[in-house]
Image (cartoon, rainbow, N blue to C red):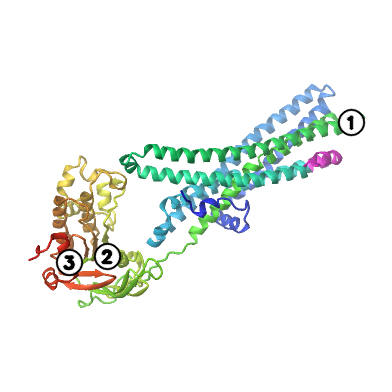
Amino acid sequence: MTQRREDDEVLGRAYDARLMARLWGVTRPHRRLVAASLALFPLTAGVELLQPYLVKVAIDDHILRRDWLGVGGVAAVFLASLIALYALRALQAYVMQLTGQRVIHDLRRALFAHLQRLDAAFFDRHPVGRLMTRVINDVEAINELFVSGVVVVIGDVVTLLGIAAIMLWMNWRLALVAFCLVPLLVAAAGYFRVRARDSYRRVRTRLARLNAFLQESLQGVTIIQLFARERDEARLFGSLNADLRAAQFRSTLFEASLYSTVEAMGSVAVALLLWYGGGDVVTGAFTFGALTAFLEYTARSFLPLRDLGAKYTVMQAAMVSAERIFGLLDTAPGVVGGSRRGPAASAADVPAVEFRDVWFGYEEGRWVLRECSFTIGRGETVALVGPTGEGKTTIARLLTRAFDAQRGQILVEGVDVREWDLHALRRRVGLIPQEVFLFTGSVRDNLTLAADGAVSAERVDRVVAMAHAGPLLASLPAGLDQEVRERGANFSQGQRQLLAIARALIYNPRVLALDEATSSIDAESEALIRSAMGELLRGRASLIIAHRLSTVQAADRILVLHKGRIREAGRHAELLAGGGIYARLYELQFGRGAGS
């Protein structure tokens, strides 16, 4: 199984000034929350650093002097500091979570809105699963940046600076004894950081492979069962799962090594303080309470260093996620609408649709359409036929500007589609695709999906009758309120096509393209759909794309597409009599002599 390079390059720098600047820009609407969170750090650190000093005061000024009343007073202050510390930490955690959730809410909304504006070519190049990862997982990593990453690091730095200042103030010689291990600690953290980074990359890569395999297996479970490949799939899954487990063990080893190294150095620091500071206590140069406070400050200074590995990983993941998120947001739509919302003049002799020498290819130099030209008059029904892969569906997608032609012009009511406002164009030109997509919800919600404003019950009932979908709805237990499962899985292909026709009637565009509306359905469903299409096409310019030639014989004109060009045009009988491409296609479907 191969993966894209993007899966392998999971980690980058733990801090990127450019990305952090953009992230802080996203937080600008929530700057009050950010300011409140930052203001809580010195308060929390101050209360936390007060506690070891209170222990010193209790020992030196009260316990050694047997002043139990004074001990009680210091204990009361210590208890108050504990309550204040817990309250500040709870408030701080709430504010950080609130800030993070609001930021990722804004990011998700911006990403979703941006994805809605991107063109069809973008979605052809990028798998849906990867885009979902951007909107869900990568955005969640930004939340971790606020909760466990950079914001917590700021708090740790404030605490460490406060500890260093107090220790130097109390006894700078003893403070230097404790600080002498810092270079060794930094070197060890750097060593394990690099090893943990490579190990974490392996974990993420193997996790991506396992997820991809799982998604593919679940989507293709019917085929797996059909070909009795359950054991083979289980073996492949077990291999990928074992690779992930091994990578996780390696990552855990480095994290545990860093944790134990910091703990060991902390113990060494305590031993040095006891040895050096104990001598000062014996000689009277240093008090017993001050030494106790020193030991407590030293222990608290090693806590953030011990958690350095986890915070570094969070920072790395957040930077990579930010890179991907902003890369997606910076992706410009390939199709941008103009300002025209309708034709300047509605002359009767202007075709509803006109293709003028259109050239188009999905890849550079590989043309699907070449000098493709044709017109569709107002109220005219035109059928488009031809062998598979000749570009029939492409013409429908160009008409709605899912893609833009590289050469030539496509006009709707005399206006180049590039000049149309996209919403206005797609309101004017409708498309019923071969694979009808139904959203989860009710049948009624799907029928009124694209309607402007509320749709009355009478209009829905009238449209259902026109689309010959009445028997279908009558067979449903809840009728129009029947639940539609994911992708309309509880409806057959023919039923979905009938609902799509009813939806198009409510949408009521002036120009309509139908792409293989009767493909992959039984004869009874085809008869219903053909009857419904008669109501749907009446009075509007229509383009019918079909492989089944039986569905296009009544069209006003039939266009035959071959090698990217319109090779033949005419009515059914004329094209059969001509003995050209259409006649050969007809013979292939119905046999020689069927049209005579």
Mark 3 in CB contact with mark 1 (< 8 angstroms): no
The amino acid type of the residue labelled 1 equals: Gly
SS class, disc 2:
helix
Q: Nearer the viewer, mark 2 or mark 1?
A: 2
Q: Residue furthest right?
A: 283
Residue 3: % across, % down:
48, 51
Marked residue nearer the N-terminal end (3 or 1): 1
Q: Quadrant of the C terminus?
A: bottom left
Foreground of the two, 370 or 22: 370
Residue assigned mark 1: 279
Q: What's under tag 2, amino acid-wise?
A: Lys
* C-alpha distance separating marks 3 and 2: 18 Å
Residue at figure coordinates x 49%, y 39% from the top left: 241
Instruction: Report which residue position mark 3 lands on.
Output: 584
Q: Is residue 356 magenta?
A: no
Task: State the residue at coordinates (64%, 42%).
Answer: 309
Q: Which residue is more in the foreground, 135 or 255?
A: 255
Marked residue nearer the N-terminal end (3 or 2): 2
**C-alpha distance separating marks 3 and 1:** 107 Å
Magenta region: which residues?
165-181
Q: Nearer the viewer, mark 3 or mark 1?
A: 3
Q: Which residue is mark 2?
A: 392
Secondary structure under tag 3 reads helix
Callout 1: SS:
helix
Q: Earlier in the sequence, mark 2 or mark 1?
A: 1
**Count of residue discs:** 3
Q: Is residue 36 visible?
A: no
